[in-house]
Image (cartoon, grey):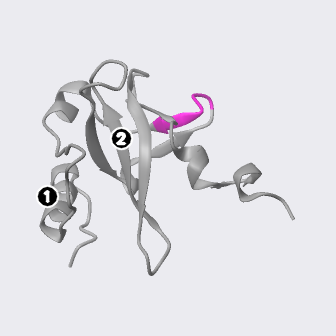
Amino acid sequence: MADATTITSGTLIAAEKVNGTNVYNPKGDKLGSVEDIMIDKVSGKAIYAVMSFGGFLGIGDKHHPLPWSSLKYDTSKEGYVVNLDKKTLEGAPSYDNDFSWTPDYGRKVDKYYGVPTYWL
């Protein structure tokens, strides 16, 4: 049986291989990289990609949850493209390492990006 970390077939990819994948805007500017994925425990669907943005050598990075539906994989870039510019991202919801996710925060993220809310 193949190790789950080596499986990448068609449109499926192991979560650990998504971590570190670059995120670009439509102009091709690198905005950051995927640091983590938030998955619904019941459905198993990816709901948010947590992107690291800003800082230098990992110091001062902000963590920006992006609705998974806002990301499109671009095979030519081997990364995700999101319809944002750096200025819009600077005003986006973000958090530091001492953070507890709440449904209210999730609704704020969904509203900022104009996607249907995951949180009822």
Q: Nearer the viewer, residue 62 or 93?
A: 62
Label 2 vs 1, first from the N-terminus: 2
Q: Are marks 2 and 1 in contact (CB under 8 Å)?
A: no
x%, y% of residue 52? 34, 36
Instruction: Look at the numbered disc 1 and give the secondary structure of its residue.
Output: helix
Q: Quadrant of the N terminus?
A: bottom right
Q: Amino acid at mark 1?
A: Lys
Q: Residue 44's x, y, as percent?
A: 50, 73
Q: Main secondary structure of the magenta part?
A: loop
Q: Which mark is residue 51?
A: 2
Q: Quadrant of the C terminus?
A: bottom left
SS at badge 2: strand
Looking at the image, which residue is at 18% across and 26% down? 87
Q: Which residues are magenta?
A: 76-80
Q: Which mark is residue 108?
A: 1
Q: Is residue 64 above or below residue 69?
A: above
Residue 100: x and y, percent? 20, 60
Image spot of residue 40 (x, y percent): 41, 72
Lateral position of residue 54 relative to residue 15, left or right: left
In the displayed orientation, state which residue is furthest to the front. 98
Is residue 21 located in the magenta-colored stretch of the structure? no
At 27% from the left edge and 43% from the top edge, which residue is drawn? 64
**Residue that appears at 58% across and 49% down:** 16
Q: Which mark is residue 10?
A: none
- Quadrant of the image occupied by residue 109: bottom left
